[in-house]
């Protein structure tokens, strides 16, 4: 889960980029905060870098580790 202190720094969007699920070690399409769809832990990842590998962290269950964008970084 990601946390924030001041909601004035966030703006809600409904783009399809938030719906895509990415596999471990895949290339990050957009800089931002990503959430593991299996356990809910979050990471930051930078565009064109790779997501953490499958063994980055372990789940209490057999669910796979996949990453989904929850906060997109804005570049002007």
Image: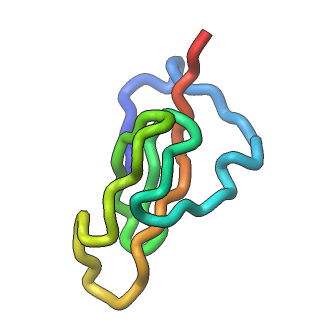
| Residue at the image position 53 percent from the left and 46 percent from the top | 70
How is the protein colored in the picture?
rainbow
Residue farthest to the top, as pictured: 76
Q: Is residue 14 left or right of residue 59?
A: right
Whole-percent x, y for residue 32 in the image: 48, 36
Q: How many marks?
A: 0
Residue at screen point 58% across, 42% down:
29
Q: Position of residue 21 (x, y in %)?
A: 59, 62
| Position of the C terminus by quadrant | top right
Q: In the image, what residue occupies the spot 51% across and 19% down? A: 9
Between residue 31 and residue 36, name the one nearer to us. Answer: 31
Task: Find residue 61 and report its horizontal and vertical position in percent.
Answer: 32, 88
In the picture, measured across the screen, residue 19 lies left or right of residue 65, that is: right
Decide if residue 76 is on the left or right side of residue 13: left
Q: Position of residue 56 (x, y in %)?
A: 24, 64
- Above/below status of 28 relative to 5: below
Tell which of 23 and 57 is nearer to you.
23
Figure quadrant of residue 24: bottom left
Residue 58 sits in quarter: bottom left
Q: Nearer the viewer, residue 54 or 42?
A: 54
Above or below for 60 versus 44 = below
Identity of the residue drawn at 63% across and 27% down: 11
- Look at the picture and state if 31 lies above or below 50: above
């Amino acid at each position: 889960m990601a946390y924030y202190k001041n909601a004035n720094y966030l703006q809600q969007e409904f783009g399809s980029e938030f719906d895509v699920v990415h596999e471990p070690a895949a290339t990050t399409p957009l800089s931002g905060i990503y959430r593991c769809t299996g356990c809910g832990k979050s990471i930051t990842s930078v565009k064109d870098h790779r997501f953490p590998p499958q063994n980055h962290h372990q789940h209490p269950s057999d669910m796979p580790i996949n990453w989904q964008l929850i906060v997109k970084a804005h570049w002007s």
